[in-house]
Image (tube, helix red, strand yellow):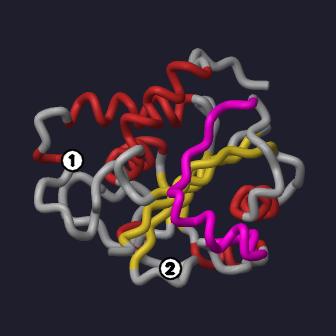
């Protein structure tokens, strides 16, 4: 187990400040498989609980699909190969910027994180959330900005969607993987 300084209350407060007002999914689960994509699938399907018992966030709009017997909703039913094909690795610094950017309605918002007065606070909250996964965590994204490099500047320009994992017009995701946990952070522009 990694030594981490983030506690449940600090993590949840940062998660709420970041993602409470946007259409998102934020859920963590245990690493139970050699292939991290199997663990990410389990989180997307909600078949595992947060291994620490910490809070999760998801839009109430997802309840309809989930309660109707679609456990992956809003995600498509995926296999591990789908995740490997659609996600690209990014650096920890890029992951912080991407998570901070998911705090906005990234496709519609005229005032992106880079222009906000509370930019440093938003970035600090994103760091707090990702610190849970430790210094050796690996990160992946569905963003097209990561097609050509593993350290795109997610704050420098408009975000782009990428590989679509849902039936929404635009979705954008970040996956965090440590030796013992995975985190799935997804934003949807469903308006």
Identify which residue, 76 or 128, lies in the foreground: 76
Q: Residue at x 53, y 84 (%)?
A: 167
Measured from the top left, where is residue 118 in percent x and y? 18, 33
Q: Earlier along the polypeptide chain: callout 2 or callout 1?
A: 1
Q: Residue at x 28, y 60 (%)?
A: 105
Judging from the image, what secondary structure is the residue with disc 2 in? loop
110 vs 189, left or right, is left
Point out the image quarter for the N terminus.
Answer: top right
Q: Residue at x 35, y 48 (%)?
A: 21
Measured from the top left, where is residue 150 in percent x and y? 44, 59
> Which disc is residue 113 wearing?
1
Label 1 packing within 10 angstroms: few (<14), some (14-19), many (20+)? many
Query: What residue is disc 2 on?
Result: 163
Give how far apart the Cα atoms at labels 2 and 1 are: 23 Å
Q: Residue at x 62, y 35 (%)?
A: 55
Is 108 covered by the magenta stretch?
no
Q: Which residues are magenta?
A: 53-73
Q: Main secondary structure of the magenta part?
A: loop
Q: Quadrant of residue 30?
A: top right
Identify which residue, 186 or 130, lies in the foreground: 186
Identify which residue, 146 or 18, lies in the foreground: 18
Is 61 covered by the magenta stretch?
yes
> Which disc is residue 187 wearing?
none
Q: Quadrant of residue 83?
A: bottom right
Label 2 packing within 10 angstroms: few (<14), some (14-19), many (20+)? some
Number of dots carrying numbers: 2
Identify whether 168 is placed above or below 127.
below
Measured from the top left, where is residue 163 in percent x and y? 50, 79
């Amino acid at each position: 187990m990694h030594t981490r300084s983030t506690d449940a209350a600090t993590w949840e407060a940062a998660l709420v400040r970041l993602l409470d007002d946007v259409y998102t999914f934020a859920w963590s689960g245990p690493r139970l498989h050699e292939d991290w994509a199997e663990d990410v699938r389990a989180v997307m399907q909600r078949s595992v609980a947060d291994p620490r018992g910490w809070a999760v966030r998801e839009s109430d709009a997802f309840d309809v699909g989930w309660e109707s017997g679609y456990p992956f909703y809003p995600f498509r039913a995926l296999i591990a190969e789908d995740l490997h094909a659609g996600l690209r690795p990014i650096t920890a610094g890029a992951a912080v910027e991407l998570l901070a950017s998911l705090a906005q309605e990234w496709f519609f918002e005229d005032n992106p994180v880079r222009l906000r007065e509370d930019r440093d606070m938003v970035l600090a909250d994103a760091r707090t959330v990702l610190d849970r996964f430790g210094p050796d965590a690996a990160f992946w994204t569905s963003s097209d900005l990561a097609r050509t490099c593993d350290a795109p500047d997610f704050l420098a320009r408009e975000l782009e969607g990428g590989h679509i994992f849902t039936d929404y017009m635009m979705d954008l995701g970040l996956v965090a993987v440590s030796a013992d946990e995975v985190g799935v952070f997804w934003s949807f522009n469903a308006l």
